[in-house]
């Protein structure tokens, strides 16, 4: 989240897309209700915030929203694009913010164009874009040329207006299935949010990420927010509701193929030196007033990380052990792992608290992939559909040669350490219980394994052992590191004084500092572990003096305990808050006060050298136009890979032209279905009572939601002769489920410009492992939702298209 | 009567009952004190945790008691009223987190499944750790690329992958990444991707 959970109470309007917070983040949802039910807020209104929920399914969130719109899954670019068009056509954008705080005035160079569904630079043979035309016109210093009148035909503002002029209410309705009058009601409410004294937030979850256009679905909301001037303000922002207790923290710590801790990039093979790497990867400055903080300090963060990992073996003479960092050949993301296994190139896999079979996508292909491995290690407290894959329904164990290890691990409550929530708040937890029985901590297992491997290399030699020999394991007991010791390593210290650092501004690139993760530097300074702090609502007057919900002394948020990112943009050019009733930061004549400023604390707004507000980007401003995306500088609507219709905007380029087609590239048979064979649109979803798959082991929760089901709209059920509670078979090109049907009004039919299409919903939580599976071994053979989903993902992130695919449904027996 | 918070009440209830005047509270605490003596959490140690399920990050208060045989028993988990995030509230998952923590369905000891076998064998930690270390070394030696076809130094291990971590702490995740990158692993992923 750019903002955080409690901050949502500050909003005037809350758009919820691709999310169902009342059910998936119920306790966080109290802040939406507080915004809605608070009669004292709202300038001049005396009323609370409005909630607008756009979702394929009517859920508990919809039930308390002020407006619910049934939207076709995966069409949010059309929805937000239509709102962008409405705002621009009616001049409802926040003029000053757009002019000074976004790249609206930047001029794009000649050669950029969008025509017939493709941006300039498309290479059909490689299904990719050469993005060199998606660039600014620059002067002799490399700075972008700008037109502050926003009239130049190639300035971002005019290109944006032109791009979204196609997203009329009629087109929006044709693509999304939302009736025009309903869309216009939303547009009118959203159109008010460009006023400086109003603020809107967009809240989203995997309903936006789980698509081949996921990154652009999200970005289209962000572009709208920049036009309305809502980024950087309390009650504003783009708020991603993440799914797991520490998915945020472990994204920050880079359990991800393409990054290193703190969102540094993993180096690429062509980057021969540390200097090459920094030159390639650090953002470039496009405006003299852009601080370009990340780009400017990139080398310091990377060298400090290398010092943390390689200690004295990382010196000026060996480029601080830069070459010890592995450089991937190409995309090495989640699906690529199983693709490599299917190609016979993956020998082993370690799964720690994550079950591949249930997650998929295309669980049958995943099972095949796991069978191709030489060895599989599952680290978990309970058996999973991955640890038990070799005797899953339909598998013949005698034909599966994979060696499988199941290592019992401790629970969250049996160890201390910090979880970082969706709002970037880092909260330390106590060790409440000792490890149960023979279970061991994940970090002790990995440390022990690593040291055994090091011993093997010491004894036997082998391929390039240097990084293994020199990796720092400077813990009191290297086989049993304490999480407190690791926390201090993450924070970082001055290697000369030995003192822990209180800010990443102190990091250097000369080898005298170390920090495991620069964005966490300052959470554990010399004064102690700030993530342990508990100054909360027991004393609101003392702990939240501004009343904005910052609670700066409860735990710690990255970076530097800032609660709202980009908060310089919450104040105007003179440093006065756009909305004095809801200030983020403001200039008091000497310094910035309020939240922790996302800006130099004493830099005057009227200083002619003052930095632009978005200090991390090379432009210094928010990016309406961005060349960092692989599928386009502006979000564009593309159909899901499996779709019931052709793209109304450009039928000849219907789905994403750059989403990577794994099966095709590997020469495997096609696994995409056609609307003729599979006419029904399916989406997956989650229940309050279950969390992925582990809760199948929790008796109370299984009692509440015991059995796998699919949710069907009444009209479709009638067509198929299916009654509520009947057993049905749901099939896609890839597999099938056999489950109970729940027939409801919550789903329905969409009218896509005359073509009628049904949408159904499939909760993901069941498989062949768990309390219910044990009670019903025959029934649970076909409970895996991801047996249906397609093995294809977002062009940028390769997040699988779990939420939009085609199926057919029939009654069984 | 002044407004009492739950916290104040519990503090008062710990004070010797005889010293509290009826007028201070408006009712006699003696009976309530006796009831508290019988509460499950009487004499328990309070610790602070965070819910292991979603990313709201609800704060938990956990009550434990050391038993006569030296074991630590978890008595209760509830929401922490001081948290600015959840203010004491929990959803059904957080509210039943005790059943996740204390469960007879957990894997009791390391298990090993040999190639082609149709059942698990119970084994020791040393057995699995030695075997896995051997597997990793052999896989790494077989699939490590020091210099790629274009002549670039890449130092990567292509044949193994690590995935997971959305439910363990920052410190564990950081160590996992450090160790895996130290081995040269490039296929590193977690739930964030999916």
Image (tube, coloured by chain):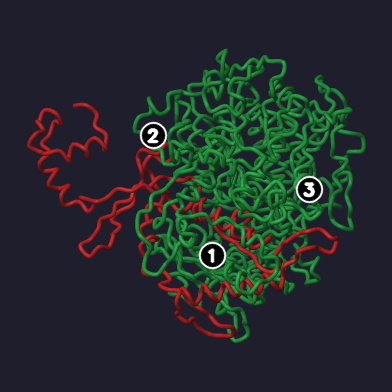
Chain colours: A green, B red
Q: Pointer 2 indicates a residue of which chain? A: A
Residue A630 marker: 3
- Whether residue A751 is visible here, answered yes or no, is no
Circle 2: is it few (<14), some (14-19), or many (20+) Cα within 10 Å? some
Query: Mark 2 touching mark 3, by CB under 8 A?
Result: no
Residue A351, by quadrant, is bottom right
Circle 1 — which element? strand
Is residue A26 visible from the viewing direction of this image? yes
Cα distance, mark 1 to mark 3?
40 Å
Residue shown at the point (72%, 25%) measured from the top left: A98
Among the two numbered marks 2 and 1 on one chain, the one whose residue lies closer to the N terminus: 2
Q: CA distance from mark 2 to mark 1?
A: 48 Å
Q: Nearer the viewer, mark 2 or mark 3?
A: 2
Which one is earlier in the sequence, the residue at label 2 or at label 3?
2
In front of the other: A133 or A269: A269
Q: Secondary structure at mark 2?
A: loop
B27 vs B113, left or right, is left
Which residue matches tag 2? A535
Which residue appears farthest toward the left when viewing the image?
B18
Q: How far, Cα to Cα, is label 2 from label 3? A: 44 Å
Instruction: Tell me the quadrant of the picture where the N terminus of chain A can be found.
Output: top right
- Tell me: B147 left or right of A244: right
Q: Which mark is residue A741?
A: 1
Disc on res. B29: none
The chain identifier of the residue carrying mark 3 reads: A
Mark nearer the N terminus (1 vs 3):
3
Residue in the picture at 84% in, 56% down: A127
User: Quick one: A527 or A52, which is closer to the camera?
Assistant: A527
């Amino acid at each position: 989240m750019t903002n955080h959970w409690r901050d949502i109470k500050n909003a005037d309007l809350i758009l919820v897309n691709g999310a169902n917070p009342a059910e998936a983040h119920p306790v966080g949802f109290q802040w939406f209700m507080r915004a809605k039910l608070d009669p004292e807020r709202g300038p001049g209104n005396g009323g609370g915030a409005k909630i607008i929920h756009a979702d394929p399914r009517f859920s508990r969130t919809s039930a308390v929203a002020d407006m619910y719109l049934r939207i076709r899954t995966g069409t949010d670019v059309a929805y937000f694009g239509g709102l962008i068009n409405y705002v621009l056509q009616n001049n409802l954008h926040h003029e000053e913010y757009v002019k000074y705080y976004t790249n609206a005035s930047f001029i794009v160079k000649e050669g950029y164009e969008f025509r017939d569904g493709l941006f300039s630079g498309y290479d059909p043979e490689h299904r990719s874009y050469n993005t060199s035309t998606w660039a600014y016109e620059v002067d002799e210093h490399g700075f972008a040329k700008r037109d502050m009148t926003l009239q130049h035909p190639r300035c971002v503002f005019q290109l944006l207006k032109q791009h979204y002029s196609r997203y009329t209410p009629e087109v929006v309705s044709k693509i999304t299935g939302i009736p025009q009058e309903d869309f216009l009601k939303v547009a009118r409410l959203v159109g008010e949010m460009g006023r400086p004294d109003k603020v809107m937030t967009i809240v989203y979850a995997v309903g936006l990420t789980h698509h081949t256009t996921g990154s652009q679905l999200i970005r289209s909301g962000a572009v709208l927010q920049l036009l309305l001037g809502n980024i950087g303000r309390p009650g504003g922002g783009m708020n991603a509701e993440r799914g797991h207790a520490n998915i945020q923290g472990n994204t920050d710590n880079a359990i991800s193929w393409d990054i290193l801790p703190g969102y540094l990039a993993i180096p690429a093979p062509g980057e021969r030196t540390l200097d090459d790497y920094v030159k390639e990867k650090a953002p470039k400055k496009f405006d003299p007033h852009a601080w370009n903080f990340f780009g400017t300090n990139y080398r310091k963060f990377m060298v400090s990380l290398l010092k943390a990992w390689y200690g004295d073996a990382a010196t000026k003479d060996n480029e601080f052990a830069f070459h010890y960092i592995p450089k991937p050949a190409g995309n090495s993301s989640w699906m690529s792992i199983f693709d490599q296994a299917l190609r016979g190139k993956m020998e082993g896999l370690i799964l720690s608290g994550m079950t591949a079979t249930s997650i998929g996508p295309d669980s049958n292909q995943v099972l095949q992939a796991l069978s191709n491995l030489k060895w599989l290690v599952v680290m978990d407290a309970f058996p999973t559909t991955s640890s038990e894959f070799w005797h899953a329904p339909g598998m013949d164990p005698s034909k599966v040669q994979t060696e499988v290890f199941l290592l019992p691990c401790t629970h969250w409550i049996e160890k201390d350490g910090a979880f970082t929530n969706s709002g970037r708040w880092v909260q330390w937890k106590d060790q409440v219980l000792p490890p149960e029985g023979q279970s061991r901590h994940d970090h002790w297992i990995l440390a022990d394994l690593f040291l055994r491997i090091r011993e093997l290399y010491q004894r036997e030699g082998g391929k390039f052992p240097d990084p293994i020999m020199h990796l720092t394991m400077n813990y009191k007991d290297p086989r049993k590191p304490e999480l407190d010791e690791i926390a201090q390593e993450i924070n970082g210290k001055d290697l000369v004084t030995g003192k822990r650092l209180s800010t990443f501004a102190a990091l250097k690139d000369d080898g005298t500092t170390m920090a495991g993760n620069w964005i966490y530097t300052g959470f554990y300074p010399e004064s102690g572990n700030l993530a342990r702090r508990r100054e909360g609502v027991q004393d609101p007057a003392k702990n939240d003096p501004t009343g904005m919900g910052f609670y700066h002394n409860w735990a710690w948020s990255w970076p530097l305990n800032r609660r709202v990112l980009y908060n310089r943009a919450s104040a105007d050019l003179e440093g006065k808050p756009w909305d004095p009733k809801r200030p983020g930061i403001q200039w008091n004549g000497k310094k910035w006060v309020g939240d922790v400023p996302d800006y130099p604390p004493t830099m005057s707004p009227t200083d002619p050298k003052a930095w632009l507000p978005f200090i991390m980007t090379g432009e210094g401003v928010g990016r309406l136009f961005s060349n960092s995306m692989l599928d386009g500088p502006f979000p564009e609507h593309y159909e899901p890979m499996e779709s019931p219709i052709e793209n109304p905007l450009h039928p000849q380029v219907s789905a994403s032209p750059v989403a990577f087609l794994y099966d095709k590239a590997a020469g495997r048979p096609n696994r995409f279905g056609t609307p003729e064979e599979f006419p029904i649109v399916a989406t997956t979803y989650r229940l309050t009572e279950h969390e992925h798959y582990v809760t199948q082991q929790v008796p109370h929760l299984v009692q509440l939601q015991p059995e796998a089901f699919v949710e069907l709209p009444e009209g479709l059920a009638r067509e198929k002769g299916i009654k509520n509670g009947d057993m049905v078979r749901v099939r896609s090109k890839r597999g099938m489920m056999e489950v109970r049907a729940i027939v409801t009004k919550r789903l329905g039919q969409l009218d896509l410009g005359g073509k009628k299409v049904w949408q159904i919903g499939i909760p993901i939580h069941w498989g062949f492992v768990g309390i219910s599976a044990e009670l019903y071994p025959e029934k649970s053979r076909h409970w895996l939702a991801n047996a249906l989903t397609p093995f294809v993902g977002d062009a940028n992130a390769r997040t699988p298209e779990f939420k939009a695919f085609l199926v057919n449904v029939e009654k069984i027996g | 009567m002044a407004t009492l918070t739950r916290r104040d009440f519990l503090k008062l209830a710990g004070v010797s009952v005889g010293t509290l005047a009826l007028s201070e509270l408006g009712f006699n605490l003696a009976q309530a004190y006796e009831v508290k003596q019988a509460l499950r959490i009487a004499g328990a140690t309070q610790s602070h945790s965070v819910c292991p399920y979603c990313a709201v990050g609800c704060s938990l208060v956990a009550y434990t008691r050391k038993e006569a045989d030296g074991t630590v028993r978890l008595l209760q988990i509830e929401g922490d009223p001081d948290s600015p995030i959840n203010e004491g509230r929990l959803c059904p998952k957080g509210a039943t987190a005790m059943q996740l923590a204390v469960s007879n369905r957990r894997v009791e000891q390391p298990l090993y499944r040999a190639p082609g076998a149709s059942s698990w064998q119970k084994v020791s930690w040393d057995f699995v750790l030695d075997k896995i270390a051997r597997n990793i070394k052999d896989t790494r030696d077989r699939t490590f690329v020091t210099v790629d076809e274009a002549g670039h130094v890449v130092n990567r291990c292509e044949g193994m992958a690590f995935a997971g971590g959305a439910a363990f702490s920052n410190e564990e995740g950081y160590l996992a990444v450090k160790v895996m990158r130290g081995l040269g692993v490039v296929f590193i992923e977690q739930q964030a991707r999916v």
